[in-house]
Amino acid sequence: MIHATVIIDPSSSVTEGVEIGPYTVIGANVSIGSGTVIGPHVTINGTTSIGKNNRIYQFSSIGEDPQDKKYAGEKSFLEIGDNNEIREFTTIHRGTTQDKNVTIIGSDNLLMAYTHVAHDCVIGNDVILANAASLGGHVHIGNNVILGGFSIVHQFCHLGEHCFSAMGSAITKDVPPFVMVGGRPTKPHGINSVGLDRRGFSKDAILQIKRAYKTLYKSGLTLSDATEALVEAVKDQPELSIMVDFLKNSSRSILR
């Protein structure tokens, strides 16, 4: 199950049932859960925890030092959940002490080839990063988000649950839940109604989310006034609560 050419640091923990391909290097303080399959020529470093039943393809670099000039070699962390698929040439970096010192990737995510997850990012569950999508440091991605190929996200941006970016998007501010963005410059283009339908949202819930989008983007209200209007709407439409909570906590403002 582990090829003879694999190098594993004695301080690392590889659970029984893990498969590791030729010429892969497992550095110090790495733990890998059962059922995980790691391809050839993969490098995993740092204090990195990888859960169960993940698939990591060849030439990926997992848990490497942050690309941050303030990083001075201090111990930092990467946590990866279960059932993730991490494709060829993906790079994922550990956290820094300028944040919570940990990069976190949830479960059931697909990171396609050449994707990059920078230091201190937090990715939820059921997220898709299409080919060459890249996240700057400190980016937070909610559950069920899809980033199209070659999308880039500026550091410190937050993307709410169920949002969607078109291919080649350049995201420089927060994206609220449910919203689709695209184009250059990248702007909002309605809600992710197809994705919501596929995930079991009722027609009425989707209708209410569309109305909330119009309040936020088409009413002519300021962002603060639109947020207050949505706070009132939540009383009768609880499915909008995650949008309101997101707007209240946004620190970079939103794409508008």
Image: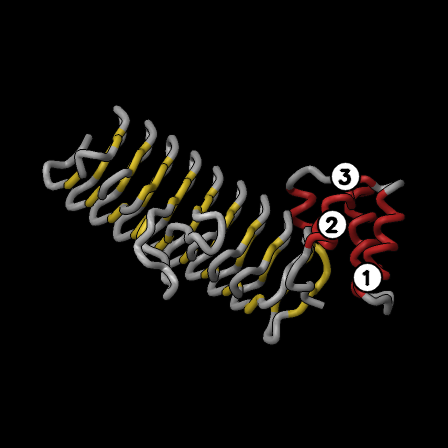
Quadrant in which the N terminus appears: top left
Q: Which is more foreground, mark 2 or mark 3?
A: 2
Q: Is residue 150 left or right of residue 56?
A: right
Quadrant in which the C terminus appears: bottom right
Disc 3: which residue: 202
How many numbered marks, from 0 up?
3
Distance between the alpha carbons at the discs numbered 1 and 3? 28 Å
Q: Residues within 10 Å of mark 1 (few under 14, many from 20)?
A: few
Does residue 208 lie above or below 256 as drawn? Answer: above
Amino acid on which disc 2 is placed? Met
Disc 2: which residue: 243
Disc 1: which residue: 224
- Asked if marks 1 and 3 touch (Cβ < 8 Å), the reply is no
Q: Residues within 10 Å of mark 3 (few under 14, many from 20)?
A: few
Distance between the alpha carbons at the discs numbered 2 and 3? 17 Å
Q: Position of residue 9 (x, y in %)?
A: 18, 38
Point 45% across, 61% down: residue:
134
Amino acid on which disc 3 is placed? Ser
Q: Nearer the viewer, residue 221 or 108?
A: 221
Q: Position of residue 129 (x, y in %)?
A: 48, 53
SS at mark 3?
loop
Q: Position of residue 184 (x, y in %)?
A: 59, 75
Q: Nearer the viewer, residue 155 or 107?
A: 155
Q: Is residue 81 left or right of residue 242?
A: left
- Asked if marks 2 and 3 touch (Cβ < 8 Å), the reply is no
Distance between the alpha carbons at the discs numbered 2 and 1? 13 Å
Point 59% across, 47% down: residue:
142
